[in-house]
Image (cartoon, rainbow, N blue to C red):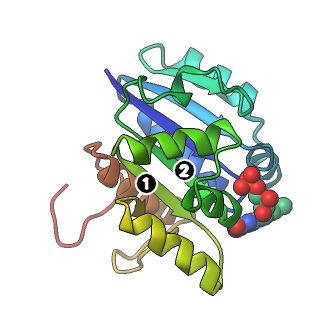
Amino acid sequence: MKKIIIGLTGASGSAYFLRLIEVLLEYQIEIHVIASENGSQVLKYETGVGLEEQIKIWNEKSPDTSITLEDNNNMFSAVASGSYRCDGMIIIPCSMSTMAEIANGITKSLLTRAADVMMKEQRKLVIVPRETPLSTIHLKNMYELSKVGVTILPAMPGFYNHPKTLEDIINHIVGKTLDCIGIDNNNYKRWKGKN
Ligand SMILES: Cc1cc2nc3c(=O)[nH]c(=O)nc-3n(C[C@H](O)[C@H](O)[C@H](O)COP(=O)(O)O)c2cc1C
C-alpha cells in the first residue's frame, strides 16, 4: 500500500487540498495529513470545511483509504522519522512562510520536519506554493528547493484545455500534482493526449 504525507498550510487555495484527498479516496493509500494552525483556519474560511470532521467523513466513506490527522506539534509521530518508509509528501497549498522554513532547514513543526525528512532521504516532495506576485526571497527559496530535487508546482492552472468550471481548474492542478508524486490519474484533460 502506498503511503503519502499531505501538508496543508495557510496559503489560499485549500480547495486544492480537499479535491486531492477526494481523488485519493479512490485508491488504497495510507494518508497522513499534517495541517498548520493557519492551514486549518484558511480551510474553514475559504471552504467552510472543518478539517477534523471532514477527515472522519472521508474515513467512513472510504474504508480502504486510511487517513490519519497528525498533530503538527507531535515530533514523536512516526512520520517525523526517516525510518518511516513512505512514497512521498505533497504540501498543498504551501504558504511562503512554510516554504521559507523548509528551504532553510527549520523544522520546528511536524509538517516542516516531515518535509525535511523527505529531502534528506531523497524521497519525493512536491510543493504547491501559492502567492502573487512573488518576491525575490520567495523565488530564491523555490530555487534552493528545486536544486535539491523538490518539485515546485505552483498553483498556476493552464487554460489550453478550455476549462468550463472552477472544478476543471482545480482538477488541473490536482491532476498535475498526482502525476508528480507518481499516482496514475485521469483527473484532468491532457494536451492532445488520451487519458
Ligand atoms: C485568508 C488568508 C489567505 C492567505 N493566503 C496566503 C497565500 O496565498 N500565500 C501565502 O504565502 N500566505 C497566505 N496567507 C498568510 C499565511 O496564512 C501566513 O503567512 C501564515 O503565517 C502561514 O503559516 P503556515 O505556513 O504555518 O500555515 C493567507 C492568510 C489568510 C488569512
Image quarter (top left, top right, bottom left or bottom right) of the C terminus: bottom left
Mark 2–mark 1 Cα distance, whole angstroms, equals 6 Å
Counting from the top left corner in percent of width and height, residue 103 is at: 55, 62
Labels 2 & 1 near each other (Cβ < 8 A): yes
Left or right of 47 in this view: 68:
left
Question: Relative to 118, is 71 above or below?
Answer: above
Question: In the picture, residue 163 is in which quadrant?
Answer: bottom left
SS assignment at label 2: strand
- At 34% from the left and 43% from the top, the residue drawn is 123
Q: Which residue is mark 2?
A: 91
Counting from the top left corner in percent of width and height, residue 118 is at: 43, 43
Name the residue nearer the viewer: 10 or 106: 106
Q: Amino acid at mark 1?
A: Val
Left or right of 136 in this view: 171:
left
Question: In the picture, residue 94 is in which quadrant?
Answer: bottom right
What's the mark number on residue 178?
none
SS assignment at label 1: strand
Counting from the top left corner in percent of width and height, residue 59 is at: 57, 19
Name the residue nearer the viewer: 115 or 89: 115
Name the residue nearer the viewer: 87 or 132: 87
Using a 10 Å C-alpha cutoff, classify the residue at mark 2 as few (fewer than 14 neighbours), some (14 to 19) or many (20 or more).
many
Q: Is residue 13 visible?
A: no
Quadrant observed for ligand 1 in the rendered image: bottom right
What's the mark number on residue 126?
1
- At 64% from the left and 26% from the top, the residue drawn is 69
Image quarter (top left, top right, bottom left or bottom right) of the N terminus: top left
